[in-house]
Amino acid sequence: MKKMFQPLFIAIAAMAFFSSCEKEEVREVYLGGTTPVLGASVSGTIPLGFLTQNDAAVKFSWTNPEYDFASGVSSQDVNYTLEIDVTGNGFAGPNKKSVSISKDLSVSYTQKEFNIILSDLKLKLNVPASIDVRLIASLGPNATKLVSNILKFGVTPFAPPPKVPIPTQGNLWVIGDAFASGWNNPLPAPFVTTQKFTQVSPTLYELVVAFKGGGYYKMLQDNGVWGTQYHMVAGDATGGTFEKKDADPAFVGPSAAGNYKIVVDFQAGTFTVTKQ
């Protein structure tokens, strides 16, 4: 008798299981959501400046998309992505910036933080530009993707602080036994002129100078003073990185004598030496 009821019991259990699965599936049916509305604490222009970089730049906020399923409004965390691109690119530009945000309904940036974000757009520094900003909300599958309205702003990105402190007086010399001047400090005439760099920009210096072949050198921002010198951190005779410090190692002179162009980039903290 028990053997007769066993198949019947299994069949009933299976029906109950599949019925439960069907109900569960119904509860997970996506019904839709409300397109988020994006707003900002400023309009027109987002303030950016090196001297005010720690001040507030902009706060973006948006409405809850209220994702709805057959079982009711979802309690799951929504994924948000803030997209920023140059106006006119339709958010399809090669340098479009996408910032992932957690379940919050707002995000704030200082001027320094937003300037760093804009750096990915490859905008020209200190030149006004126009950007578009929108928000994308999603919850799991792409079917739940909701795109907000678009906000337009004017921005003027500023150059970040140089990696190496620039010469305070705008002067820079080379000194060492890699040159005819030797290590005489201060540099006497004519070396005080022939071994002085030309300031191309606030952070870029260039000099074409005759090397003896071999030897070493340092860079001085104050002729006659070792305490404010620059020395190599890593690299070789063709280039590398440097810092402002009264220390070794010195820069390495090219092994072959001749005229070379030295380019010193304080913004990047790098130098290059090229045969002329």
Image: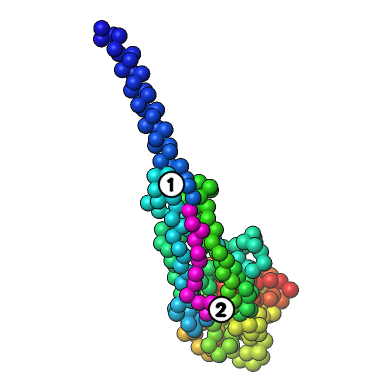
Region of the chain picked out in magenta, as a range: 33-48
Whether the magenta-drawn stretch holds residue 34 is answered as yes
Q: Are marks 1 and 2 in contact (CB under 8 Å)?
A: no
Residue drawn at (46%, 72%) of the image: 59
Please tell me which residue lies in front, 156 or 249.
156
Give amino acid for label 2.
Thr
Residue drawn at (34%, 21%) of the image: 12
Please say if 46 is above or below 34. below
Q: Which residue is mark 2?
A: 45
Whether the magenta-drawn stretch holds residue 84 is answered as no
User: Most extreme residue toward the bottom, as rendered?
Assistant: 189
Please say if 194 is above or below 89. below
User: Most extreme residue toward the right, as rendered?
Assistant: 276
| Spot occupied by residue 262 in the image (x, y as percentages of width and height) | 65, 76
Give amino acid for label 1.
Phe
Q: Quadrant of the C terminus?
A: bottom right
Q: Which residue is mark 1?
A: 69
| Spot occupied by residue 241 in the image (x, y as percentages of width and height) | 55, 70
Please tell me which residue lies in front, 6 or 120.
6
Of helix, strand and loop, which mostly describes the magenta segment?
loop
Residue drawn at (67%, 67%) of the image: 88
Eye-nearest disc, 1 or 2:
1
